[in-house]
C-alpha cells in the first residue's frame, strides 16, 4: 500500500520509509507554516493573548488524528501497548480540542466593545413588561 | 490512491486552511468568534476524515477515548473560572505534549517490537520521533510543575540550590546526547527509555527554579514546546495538517515568549536560569525609602468621586482577590458621576499573557476601555487618580530610575506621573519579586490596605455618598 502522491505528501505512516522528497516537502510545509504563523500571530493584539493561547492549544490538539489511527489499530500488525498508548493520547488530545475551543468561545463572548450588559438588561426587562 | 485517501487528504487540507483563517480572525475581537467557528469546523472535518483511515480496524477504543476526552474537555471548558485560566492552560499544555509523546512512544514500540518493519525506521524518522518524545516528555512534566505552582499546590517561590544550573544543564545535555545517539542507532532500546525518563525529570527541574511572577514567559515557552512536539509528530506520521497546526502553535508560543521577555526587559536565559525573586536578589534596593502614607477609605472615595479621569492598573492581586467585578462596579459608579475611567494593562500583569484582559472582560468591562502599556503611559500625566490593584513590579519606578535595580529597564506603567496614586494592597509586605517599591513612598501615593475585593466594594458605597 504505497501512498506517496506525486507531491511527496505522505499519508499512511509505517508503510513506507520517509523518502527524500517527502522530507523536503514536509520541511517546506513547516517553513511556510512558520512564516505564515509569524505573520498571522504577530497581528493578534495583547487584548486577545489569552484566547490566542487557548485557541492554538485547541488547534494543536489536531495531534488527535495521529492518536486515533494508533488507538484504532488491532490485530497481528498492531501492538496492544500501542493501542493503549494511543487511547490515552486520544483522551488527552480530545480534552484539549473540546476544552480549548469551549474556553476560547467562552472568553471571546466576554469581549464587548460597548457597555452592553446595562443595555441588554434594560431591553430584557422591557420585554418582560411587554409580556405582562 | 483510493478514494478514502483523497478524502482524508482533502479534509486535512481544508482543516489547515480553516485553522489559519481562525487565527487570522483573532486579530480583532469582532472577527475572533467567527474565526474560531471556522477553526472548529476544520477540526471536525479533520477528525471525520481520519476515521476513514485504512489502518483503523476497531473503533471501540477511539469512541471511548473521544467520549472520555470530550467530557473532560467540556467540563473544563464550562466550569473553569476565568481566574484559573493560567492553571488550566498549563494543564492543557501538559495534555497536548503528553499526547504527542505517547504517539511517538507507541510508534517506537511498534518498530522495536516487530510490529512494524524496523528497517523502515530511518535516521530522519528517528530524529523526528526522538525530538517529539523528548520535547513532549519534558513539556509534560514542566507544565505539570507550572500547574502546581499556579494552583498553589507547589510553592510559588523559585526552588534553588547550589550548582542547580550546572546539574540541570548536565542532565539536559545527557538527554540530548542520548537523543543524538538514537538518531544514529535507532534500535538502541535501553538508551531510548533512559532518554524518555531523563526528559521527564528535566522538565521538572527546569520549571522548579522559576518563580510564579515569571509564569507568563514560562507559559508561553511551554506553549511553544507543546506545539513543536505536535509538529514533530507530523513529521513522524508524515501528516501535513499536524505539521501546520503544530508549527502555528509553536510559533504563537514563541512570539508570546519574546513579547513577555521584552515586557520585562529580560532575556529568556535570564528568566529560565536566573531564579528571579529568590533570596539572592531580594536584598537589592532595600534600605532607602521613608514612610508610607496611609489613606482612609473616605479620603480615597472623595478623591475618586471628584476626579475627571481615573486609571485602574490591575495586577495578579486582582485575580487572587477575585476583585474584577468589584472594580467594574466602582468604575460604573464613577462613570455615573461623569468620571472618565480607563484601565492600564501591563503585558506581564498576571500569570499568563492577556490574563488581566480576560478577567476584566469577564466582569463586563468593555474592551475599548482596556489600554496597553504604550497607550496608557502618555495619558497618565493628565490622570487625576491612578488606582493600583494588586500590582507591584509593573508600576515600580525603580525600573525606570534606578539602573542598579534588578528590574532596571523593564517598561512600567508610570502611575507616579499622575496627580495622585492610590495603591490597594493586602499588607505592608514586599511584592512577589521581593523588591522594595519606591512608588509606595512617594508623596503622591496613598496606601489603602486590605483585601482588594472588600476595599473596592466599600469604595463603591463611599463614592456613591461622596
Image: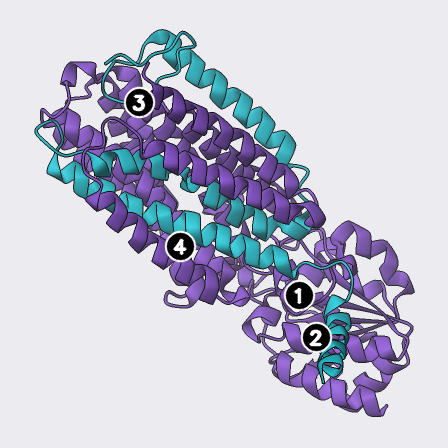
Chain colours: A cyan, B purple
Residue under label 1, please give it.
Answer: B360
Pointer 3 residue? B127
Residue B75, picture quadrant: bottom left
> Which residue does the numbered mark 2 point to in the structure image?
B327
Instruction: Please identify, in this view, whether the residue under mark 3 or under mark 4 is nearer the observer.
Output: 4
Determine the CA span between mark 3 and mark 1: 45 Å
| Residue at disc 2, secondary structure | helix
Residue B103 locus on image (x, y percent) = 27, 36
Of the image marks 3 and 1, the number of the one nearer the N terminus: 3
SS for dot 4: helix
Closest to the camera, between mark 3 and mark 1, is 1
Report if the CB atoms under discs 2 and 1 are less than 8 Å apart.
yes
* Same subunit: marks 2 and 3: yes
Instruction: Point out residue A9 in the picture as x, y percentages from the top left corner.
Output: 39, 15
Tell me: residue B453, above or below residue B381.
below
Residue B136 sits above or below residue B75 on the image:
above
**In the displayed image of the protein, which residue is found farthest to the bottom?**
B465
Q: Is residue A122 visible?
A: yes
Residue B218 is left or right of residue B391, and the answer is: left
Q: Residues within 10 Å of mark 1 (few under 14, many from 20)?
A: many
Residue placed at 87% from the left, 58% from the top? B379
- Pointer 3 and pointer 4 on the same chain: yes
Q: Earlier in the sequence, mark 3 or mark 4?
A: 4
Q: What is the x, y in percent for residue B246?
A: 45, 34
Cα–Cα gap, marks 3 and 4: 27 Å
Distance of label 2 from label 1 (alpha carbons): 9 Å
Picture quadrant of residue B88: bottom left
Tag 4 residue: B91
Amino acid at each position: 500500500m504505497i501512498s506517496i502522491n506525486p507531491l511527496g505528501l505522505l499519508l499512511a505512516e509505517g508503510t513506507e520509509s520517509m523518502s527524500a522528497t517527502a522530507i523536503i516537502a514536509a520541511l517546506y510545509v513547516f517553513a511556510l507554516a512558520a512564516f505564515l504563523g509569524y505573520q498571522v500571530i504577530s497581528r493578534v493584539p495583547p487584548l486577545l493573548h489569552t484566547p490566542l493561547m487557548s485557541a492554538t492549544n485547541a488547534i494543536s490538539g489536531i495531534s488527535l488524528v495521529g492518536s486515533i489511527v494508533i488507538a484504532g489499530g488491532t490485530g497481528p500488525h498492531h501492538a496492544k501497548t500501542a493501542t493503549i498508548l494511543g487511547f490515552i493520547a486520544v483522551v488527552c488530545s480530545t480534552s484539549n480540542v473540546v476544552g480549548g475551543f469551549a474556553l476560547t468561545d467562552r472568553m471571546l463572548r466576554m469581549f464587548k466593545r460597548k457597555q452592553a450588559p446595562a443595555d441588554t438588561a434594560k431591553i430584557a426587562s422591557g420585554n418582560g413588561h411587554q409580556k405582562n | 490512491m483510493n478514494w478514502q485517501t483523497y478524502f482524508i487528504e482533502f479534509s486535512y487540507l481544508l482543516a489547515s486552511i480553516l485553522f489559519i483563517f481562525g487565527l487570522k480572525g483573532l486579530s480583532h475581537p469582532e472577527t475572533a468568534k467567527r474565526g474560531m467557528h471556522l477553526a472548529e469546523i476544520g477540526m471536525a472535518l479533520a477528525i471525520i476524515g481520519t476515521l476513514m483511515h485504512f489502518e483503523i480496524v476497531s473503533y471501540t477504543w477511539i469512541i471511548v477515548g473521544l467520549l472520555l476526552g470530550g467530557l473532560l474537555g467540556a467540563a473544563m471548558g464550562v466550569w473553569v473560572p476565568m481566574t484559573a485560566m493560567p492553571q488550566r492552560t498549563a494543564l492543557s499544555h501538559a495534555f497536548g505534549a503528553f499526547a504527542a509523546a505517547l504517539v511517538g512512544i507507541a510508534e517506537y514500540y511498534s518498530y522495536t517490537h516487530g510490529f512494524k518493519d524496523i528497517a523502515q525506521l530511518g535516521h530522519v524518522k528517528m530524529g523526528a520521533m526522538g525530538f517529539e518524545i523528548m520535547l513532549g516528555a519534558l513539556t509534560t512534566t514542566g507544565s505539570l510543575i507550572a500547574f502546581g505552582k499556579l494552583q498553589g499546590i507547589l510553592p510559588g517561590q523559585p526552588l534553588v540550590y547550589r550548582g542547580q544550573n550546572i546539574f540541570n544543564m548536565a542532565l539536559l545535555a545527557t538527554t540530548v546526547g542520548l537523543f543524538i545517539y538514537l538518531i544514529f542507532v535507532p534500535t538502541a532500546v535501553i538508551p531510548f527509555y533512559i532518554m524518555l525518563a531523563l526528559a521527564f525529570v528535566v522538565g521538572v527541574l527546569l520549571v522548579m527554579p522559576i518563580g510564579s511572577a515569571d509564569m507568563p514567559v514560562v507559559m508561553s515557552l511551554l506553549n511553544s514546546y507543546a506545539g513543536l512536539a505536535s509538529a514533530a509528530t507530523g513529521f513522524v506520521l508524515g501528516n501535513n495538517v499536524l505539521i501546520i497546526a503544530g508549527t502555528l502553535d509553536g510559533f504563537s508560543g514563541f512570539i508570546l515568549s519574546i513579547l513577555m521577555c521584552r515586557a520585562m526587559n529580560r532575556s529568556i536565559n535570564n528568566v529560565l536560569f536566573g531564579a528571579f525573586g529568590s533570596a539572592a536578589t531580594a536584598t537589592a534596593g532595600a534600605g532607602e525609602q521613608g514612610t508610607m502614607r496611609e489613606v482612609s477609605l473616605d479620603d480615597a472615595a472623595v478623591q475618586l468621586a471628584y476626579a475627571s479621569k481615573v486609571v485602574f492598573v490591575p495586577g495578579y492581586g486582582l485575580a487572587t482577590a477575585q476583585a474584577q467585578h468589584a472594580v467594574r462596579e466602582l468604575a460604573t459608579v464613577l462613570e455615573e458621576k461623569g468620571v472618565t475611567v480607563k484601565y492600564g494593562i501591563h503585558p506581564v500583569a498576571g500569570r499568563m499573557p492577556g490574563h488581566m484582559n480576560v478577567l476584566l472582560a469577564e466582569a463586563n468591562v468593555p474592551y475599548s476601555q482596556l489600554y496597553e502599556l504604550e497607550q496608557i503611559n502618555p495619558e497618565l500625566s493628565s490622570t487625576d487618580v491612578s488606582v493600583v490593584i494588586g500590582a507591584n513590579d509593573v508600576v515600580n519606578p525603580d525600573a525606570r530610575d534606578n539602573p542598579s535595580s534588578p528590574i532596571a529597564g523593564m517598561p512600567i506603567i508610570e502611575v507616579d506621573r499622575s496627580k495622585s496614586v492610590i495603591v490597594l494592597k493586602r499588607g505592608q509586605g514586599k511584592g512577589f519579586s521581593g523588591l522594595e517599591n519606591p512608588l509606595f513612598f512617594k508623596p503622591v501615593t496613598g496606601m489603602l490596605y486590605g483585601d482588594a475585593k472588600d476595599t473596592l466594594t466599600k469604595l463603591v458605597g463611599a463614592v456613591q455618598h461622596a
